[in-house]
Amino acid sequence: MTAFTRFAHSRASWFILTGSAIALEAAALYFQYVMKLDPCVMCIYQRLAVFGILASGLIGMTAPKFLIVRILGALGWAVSATWGLKLALALVDMQNNPSPFSTCSFLPEFPAWMPLHEWFPSVMLPTGMCTDVPWQFMGVTMAEWMVVAFSGYLVTLLLFIVPILSGSNKPSLYK
């Protein structure tokens, strides 16, 4: 078993995934409450995608030696990162090509059985507009940085998918 595979089967790898998602969520709350930048609906959906990555990391951390747990963690990671990238690209397009006919809604469209914006308004209630670009770092907008972040998550998943899906840690007779 390679060192890469051992790492993918360890809690440390899933802890790093969880920690990176926590850092992104903390940054989002810092931007919202300290820098007073209002999140839009697409930002809230991206925040939810990052929560999905966080949950996937927690799933993987529970028992990374078991293949089924790693598969569930990787599946959640893939779905959340792909959805987040799709949202970030749509937001970048809205900001770069504003149109009065293509706007985002004022309230998130969560299912009636899970109104997160009502349960957790301090984290999930949008108060900004999607076409606003209130912050840039090195000439790159927040939405463009989220494209980088979600792309990074997907590239990392591609690097780790074979070790994640590889078999058990039992020694092989054919080495």
Image (spheres, rainbow, N blue to C red):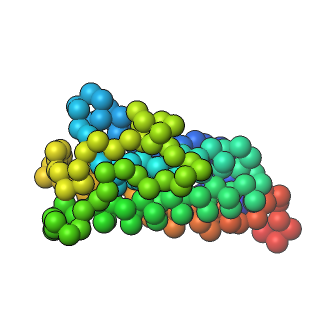
Residue 27 % position (x, y): 35, 37
Residue occupying image coordinates x 68% and y 61%: 71
Residue 1 % position (x, y): 70, 61
Residue occupying image coordinates x 29% and y 59%: 104
Left or right of 48, for residue 140: left
Residue occupying image coordinates x 16% and y 45%: 134
Residue 164 in view in this figure: yes
Residue 45 % position (x, y): 41, 53
Left or right of 45, for residue 159: right
- In the rendered image, the residue lying farthest to the right is 173
- In the rendered image, the residue lying farthest to the front is 112
Is residue 49 or residue 62 the one in the foreground?
49
Residue 145 in view in this figure: no
Task: Report which quarter residue 76 is drawn in.
Answer: bottom right
Residue occupying image coordinates x 78% and y 69%: 175
Is residue 152 or residue 28 the one in the foreground?
28
